[in-house]
Amino acid sequence: MVTIGSTCSEIGKKALLLGSGELGKEVALELQRMGVEVVACDRYAGAPAMQVAHRFHVFNMLDGEELRRIIELEKPDHIIPEVEAIATPVLVELEKEGYNVTPTAQAAWLTMNREGIRRLAAEELGITTSKYRFASTEEEFRAAIKEVGIPCVVKPIMSSSGHGQSTVKSEADVDRAWQISQEGGRAGAGRVIVEAFVDFDYEITLLTVRNVAGTAFCEPVGHIQVDGDYRYSWQPQAMSDKARKQAEEVAKKVTDALGGYGIFGVEMFIKGDEVIFSEVSPRPHDTGMVRMISQDMSEFALHARALMGLPVPEIKFYGPSASRAVVVEGDTNRVELSGIDKVLEEPGVQMRIFGKPEVKGHRRMAVILATDESVEAAREKAERAYNKLNITTLPRK
């Protein structure tokens, strides 16, 4: 039996977020709706989840000693990793000492590192993936490209939102791909994965919810990425019954191996009826933000509910929906979004502004959501709304 005491009291529940971006912010809000005290952590001040949390800590989460100090100080009931750049071996140690890591410390360790999850899926579970090789040095990297072949995709083993990722289309791209991978990794320069380019019809994120009542699946989300970073997503992605069944089997096999309770964003390529596993995130997924308008419970509500040990007996899907990411480029701590009254003038349109304090390079700052009678109409509506938005970057102060 799950019991939740008075918030911020000695009998209440406390959750520690390791990562406080826009996804963590939504998780914080959903936990607070259940009376949970939320402490947000990230490497910079003013992160979105910090703006709504009860308290926050700013530190480098790759610093194992500091990570342990904060966790021992707060003594949370739930430790919730939300980003890749965490000293996950410390989480493994702390879990053995009795702390509760969502979904498990082992899942966090394996999935925060592309090598861990790829070897689990392909080599231990026998799931179909693209051809791949890992490399720690530039020499190994060049050898890996020769083995995998061109075209191929290069990614740091620890990164998110496309940082450090590039596509090698010819020999002329090799040097630049190595440089990008070493500059964009969450933990700095280091090991990379070289993946053969997959010829696919479309790619999906299948949100899989492991909870006390079993495993539940949301309607599949289709999406488009630019340089590895999500730009558009929609729900549902049309799939054959055979491909849908196989995707659910793959997702359940991977998430059962990882264990624990919570939501998993399982990314897959689909070619005809064939399913090719790509990656899995043991937490809400950026492409899943469309579910803030398409379902009775968003992916964040599902995550909070599941990790608290509560059942998810049903997920009600409202209908065709789409999302359009608002990505801002520049180097500034002053971004103005105007024309929002025009953005929201059509029925069935919503917008979320994340509250990120600055932009360096490019950064996702908001998302536009839309519903309509069909996926195509919802996508067109979201794009129309986006085109009414004016983005101004002012000089940094």
Image: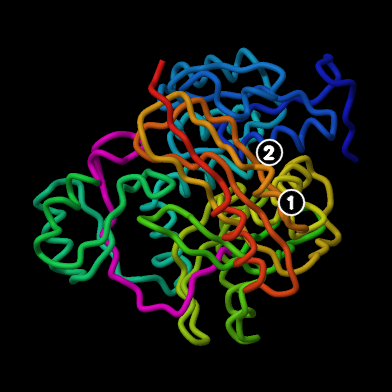
Q: In which quarter of the image is residue 173?
A: bottom left
Which region shows up in magenta? 181-205
Alpha carbon distance from label 2 to label 1: 9 Å
Question: Mark 2 = which residue?
Answer: 26
Which residue is at a point 36% across and 29% down the rendered structure image?
Answer: 331
59 vs 320, left or right, is: left
- Estimate the x, y position of residue 393 in percent, counting from the top left: 43, 32
The answer to whether residue 96 is above or below residue 117 is above
- Estimate the x, y position of residue 251 in percent, counting from the top left: 59, 66
**Viewer-closest of 372 and 104:** 372
Q: Is residue 326 magenta?
A: no
Quarter of the rendering occupied by the N terminus = top right
Q: Quadrant of residue 222?
A: bottom right
Report if residue 346 is visible in the image.
yes
The answer to whether residue 20 is above or below residue 44 is below
The answer to whether residue 221 is above or below residue 94 is below
Quarter of the rendering occupied by the C terminus = top left
Count residues near mark 1 (Cα–Cα under 10 Å), then give few for <14, some for 14-19, many for 20+: many
Q: Residue 298 carries which label?
A: 1
Which residue is at a point 10% across and 64% down the rendered structure image?
Answer: 171
Q: Which of marks 2 and 1 is nearer the N terminus?
A: 2
Which residue is at a point 66% across and 34% down the rendered structure image?
Answer: 100
Q: What element carries label 2?
A: helix
**Viewer-closest of 152 and 94:** 152
Q: Does the magenta stretch include residue 186?
A: yes
**Viewer-closest of 217 and 232:** 232
- Estimate the x, y position of residue 77 in percent, counting from the top left: 72, 28
Q: What residue type is labelled 2?
A: Glu
Report if residue 127 is visible in the image.
no
Q: Which amino acid does label 1 sit on?
A: Ser
